[in-house]
Image (cartoon, rainbow, N blue to C red):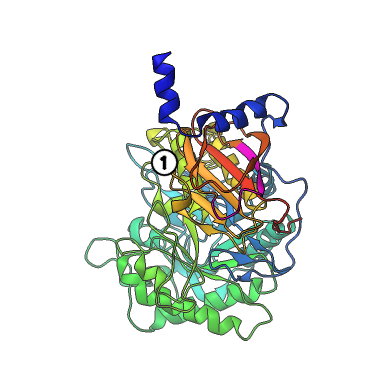
């Protein structure tokens, strides 16, 4: 009895919270294993634009929305090891995104026909063959990878036809497509003497040269520059061709590059300005993104003129503002840049912590999903039946994280995203999205470990009440509990689940929720 008294004393408000939890198990609605998937895809009909809440874009109907999804390397180009590239079943990939309830992915463009030494294995990292590329291989003469030299003044229709078809397919399924114009990373990290890189003089018929090989190290003359030059002129023409191909597609978001070198700042900013100026002449304008270059602080991208950013920090800040225009950016935390080194070794719960913490800070999440790229090093992706480095189906180890990106998207639709913001001080967990008017308040709280926590509900008088909903991210289980009186500055809650949990409180009588299909 003495131990029980001590326990009660330590937990002020425990019994009220326990009543909530017990009630949830004894008469209130309890739903098991909720799927994150949408009932049906809703085609996207207009480009995203800035919203009144700088954390989120709004769609063509004026509704603020969250972008969450999985991305992988070979969504646009085919990859393969030791032979012809393996085609991706893109329709199956679209269905995979929908099955996990997601609404955002990326289409990658790798600039070289061969990426050397991709570290998928511990010993002897393989070279990856990649196709199609944006330029025709006409010759005369052979490039360093053994194929014909590129003509940088002639675009390959097959590349741009595929780019449009896949962007259009995603749009019809209600999925936004971030279109990488360049990788940046691959010329920075995976070059070699036989890569066939089109911007090296040995590999094109146009006398265009990025300076490789020079010092014997990886050269980045196609991104590291401080003024326009012949390489930039070729790149600008390619960017304009991509815009011409996709300007009428409503689901597009541009992104210049990912993990380019620290010397690429002028180049990235040049392309942001170039895209904006060129699209200004077109019927549609799409948000422009900037992923953090390697080795520079995230303030660089916050001070840019990009509309959205993908930082290097594993937890995006609650404020992504800087000196550029627009001053505040929509922040999409892409695990490719921010969480890539340890995500493979962490538990599913820590993986979920990453996604939900970012959401509670007002940001969106992209998972660098290995999908069907076989990556046995450190057990990162043990997918099914690999052939030349590409599998027939993905590794199920990642399904809970994939589902949680969909769960977050589904929960975001409960919120009035135009009005909510991160309010860490309102919960002892430190992770809370809320709006706090005297009527119609709502709170979404994340607890990383399932321990009891408090929420400040004093914004509303005790005469008003809140509906109570618990969610278990590990299983998808939901509990609708009894309503709770508002007014307490430190209301204690004891989660009904072990591990990480989500709590949603809302004054339904005064709340105007997001209007979503």
Q: Is residue 19 above or below residue 431?
A: above
In this orientation, which residue lies closer to the viewer: 43 or 160? 43
SS at badge 1: loop
Q: Is residue 155 above or below residue 72?
A: below
Q: Quadrant of residue 416?
A: bottom right
Which residues make up the magenta segment? 458-470
For image coordinates 64% across by 54% down, the residue present is 415
- Relative image position of residue 139 (x, y in whole percent): 49, 70
Quarter containing the N terminus: top left
For image coordinates 61% across by 29% down, the residue present is 19
Instruction: Count every numbered label the image shows and give the total.
Output: 1
Q: Which residue is mark 1?
A: 343
Left/right placement of residue 444 relative to residue 40 reads left
Label 1 CA crowd tier, 10 Å (few <14, some 14–19, many 20+): some
In this orientation, which residue lies closer to the viewer: 170 or 45? 45
- Relative image position of residue 467 (x, y in whole percent): 67, 43
């Amino acid at each position: 009895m003495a131990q029980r008294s001590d326990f009660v004393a330590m937990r002020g408000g425990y019994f009220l919270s326990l009543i909530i939890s017990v009630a949830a198990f004894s008469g209130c609605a309890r739903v098991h294993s909720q799927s994150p998937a949408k009932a049906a895809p809703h085609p996207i009909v207009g480009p995203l634009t800035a919203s009144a809440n700088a954390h989120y874009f709004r769609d063509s109907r004026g509704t603020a929305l969250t972008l969450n999804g999985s991305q992988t390397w070979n969504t646009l180009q085919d990859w393969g090891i030791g032979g012809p590239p393996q085609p991706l079943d893109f329709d199956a990939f679209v269905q995979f995104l929908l099955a996990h309830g997601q609404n955002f992915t990326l289409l990658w463009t790798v600039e070289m026909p061969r990426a050397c030494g991709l570290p998928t294995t511990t010993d002897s990292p393989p070279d990856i063959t990649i196709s199609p590329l944006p330029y025709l291989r006409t010759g005369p003469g052979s490039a360093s990878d053994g194929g014909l030299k590129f003509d940088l003044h002639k675009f390959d229709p097959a590349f741009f036809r595929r780019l449009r078809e896949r962007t259009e397919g995603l749009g019809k399924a209600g999925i936004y497509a971030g279109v990488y114009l360049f990788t940046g990373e691959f010329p920075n990290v995976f070059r070699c003497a036989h890569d066939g890189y089109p911007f090296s003089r040995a590999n094109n018929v146009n006398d265009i040269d990025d300076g490789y090989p020079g010092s014997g190290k990886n050269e980045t003359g196609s991104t590291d520059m401080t003024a326009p030059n012949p390489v930039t002129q070729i790149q600008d023409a390619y960017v304009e061709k991509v815009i011409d191909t996709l300007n009428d597609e409503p689901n597009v978001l541009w992104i210049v590059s990912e993990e380019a070198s620290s010397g690429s700042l002028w180049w990235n900013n040049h392309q942001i300005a170039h895209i904006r100026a060129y699209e200004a002449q077109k019927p549609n304008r799409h948000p422009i993104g900037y992923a953090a270059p390697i080795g520079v602080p995230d303030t660089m991208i916050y001070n840019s003129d990009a509309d959205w950013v993908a930082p290097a920090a594993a937890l995006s800040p609650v404020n992504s503002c800087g000196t550029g225009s627009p001053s505040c950016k929509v922040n999409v935390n892409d695990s490719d840049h921010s969480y890539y080194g340890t995500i493979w070794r962490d538990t599913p719960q820590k993986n979920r912590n990453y996604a939900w913490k970012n959401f509670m800070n007002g940001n969106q999440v992209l998972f660098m999903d290995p999908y069907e790229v076989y990556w046995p090093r450190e057990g990162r992706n043990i997918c099914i039946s690999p052939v030349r480095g590409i599998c027939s189906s993905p590794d199920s180890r990642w399904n809970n994280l994939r589902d949680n990106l969909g769960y977050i998207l589904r929960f975001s639709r409960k919120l009035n995203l135009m009005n909510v913001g991160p309010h860490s001080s309102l919960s002892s967990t430190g992770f809370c999205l809320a709006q706090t008017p005297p009527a119609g308040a709502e709170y979404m709280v994340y607890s990383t470990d399932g321990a009891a926590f408090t929420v400040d509900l004093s914004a509303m008088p005790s005469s008003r009440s809140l509906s109570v909903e618990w969610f278990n991210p590990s299983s998808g289980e939901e509990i609708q509990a009894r309503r709770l009186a508002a007014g307490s500055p430190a209301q204690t809650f004891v989660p009904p689940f072990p591990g990480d949990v989500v709590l949603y409180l809302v004054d339904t009588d005064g709340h105007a929720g997001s209007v979503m299909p």
